[in-house]
Amino acid sequence: MKADLHVHSRYSDGADSVESVIKKAKKAGLKAISFVDHDTVAGWQEQQEIAETYGIQAIPGIEISAYDFKRQRKVHILGYDFNTEAPAITRLCKDLLELRHRHSLWQMAQIKKTGFHLDAKLVIESAKPSATVYKQHIMAQLTDAPYTSEEYQFLYRSLFKGNGVAAGDIEYVAAEDAVRAIVADGGLAVVAHPGQLDSYELVPELIGAGLGGIERNHFDHSAKDYLKVEKLAHQYGLVMTGGSDYHGAFGITIEPGDIVSPEDVNSVKRL
């Protein structure tokens, strides 16, 4: 079954509505899809209802912003097919969302001090249905340049990276806690794009917490990454997943279904 298990919508940092993404998924011939919006399951009911209308199977999903404190680096943990009430996941992510939103408000204040015209109320309104503002929402108010353009990337780096006035990040949850929360809610916990964030060393350490999968197919992965993922998957009995990591205009030029999961969608079913 052709499935894209990594797409984002306006419930976090995606540019498109749930219906727009599902329409594109239908056109691409996808049979299943999973929205893994960052640190939230708020969009699930809409995802399920619209996917059913278009004859596509929707699988509950999330991408939790976590951290490998041993190696001092970010790690993203995907969760699939959990209890959609998701009490453990929601409890873990509540503070994350609040921290990110407060940090975004601080970032906007810093950017305004440099002379940019930026209306925080308009940014907050433009982010809905996400209750959290992301850097992509701020950038959309600062420039009409496309995400992939040199102009956009230069402005982004100058503001949010290095010595930029809005640089810095929030404190994320421990990767082990993210895995445990997903498992507690009956789901499959998966390390997202380990090649992108260099998360390979962490994988064996998460097995005891209940890790059940590792993402293989991702646009940032090379042939060497595929081999590393396959080796770890075989060694620890992990499910391999994949998807486009679609963000619409807020990400690279790619469409839902351009990258799909290497294994049958039933491999992520846990309930």
Image (cartoon, rainbow, N blue to C red):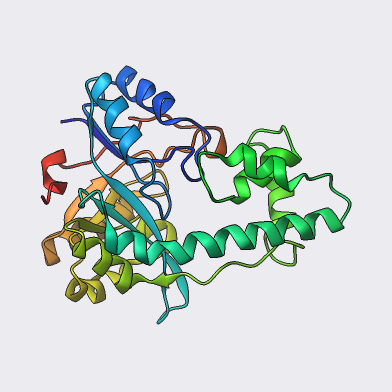
Query: Is residue 259 shown to the viewer in this render?
Result: no
Labels in figure, total: 0
Specify the farthest residue to the bottom: 70
From where the camera sits, is residue 242 visible? yes
Res 249 quadrant in image:
top right
Image quadrant where one finds the N terminus: top left
Residue 193 image position (x, y, % from top left) = 36, 54
* Res 107 → quadrant: bottom right
Horizontal and vertical percent position of residue 247: 48, 38
> In the displayed structure, would residue 150 be above or below residue 255?
below
Residue drawn at x 51%, y 44% is 130
Direction from residue 232 to residue 28 in the image, left or right? right
Q: Residue at point 19% right, 56% down?
A: 188
Expressed as whole percent of the image width and height from the top left, the position of residue 264 reads 13, 39
Above-or-below relation of 173 to 62: below
Q: State the image coordinates of residue 82 (x, y, percent, origin top left).
A: 21, 52
Give the left or right position of residue 165, taking residue 32 as reference: right
Identity of the residue drawn at 27% across and 54% down: 79
Residue in front for this viewpoint, 152 or 101: 101
Q: Nearer the viewer, residue 197 or 67?
A: 67
**Along the line of sight, the residue nearer the viewer: 157 or 9:** 9
Vertical side of 34 occupied by 105: above or below: below
Q: Within the image, what quadrant is residue 208 found in?
A: bottom left
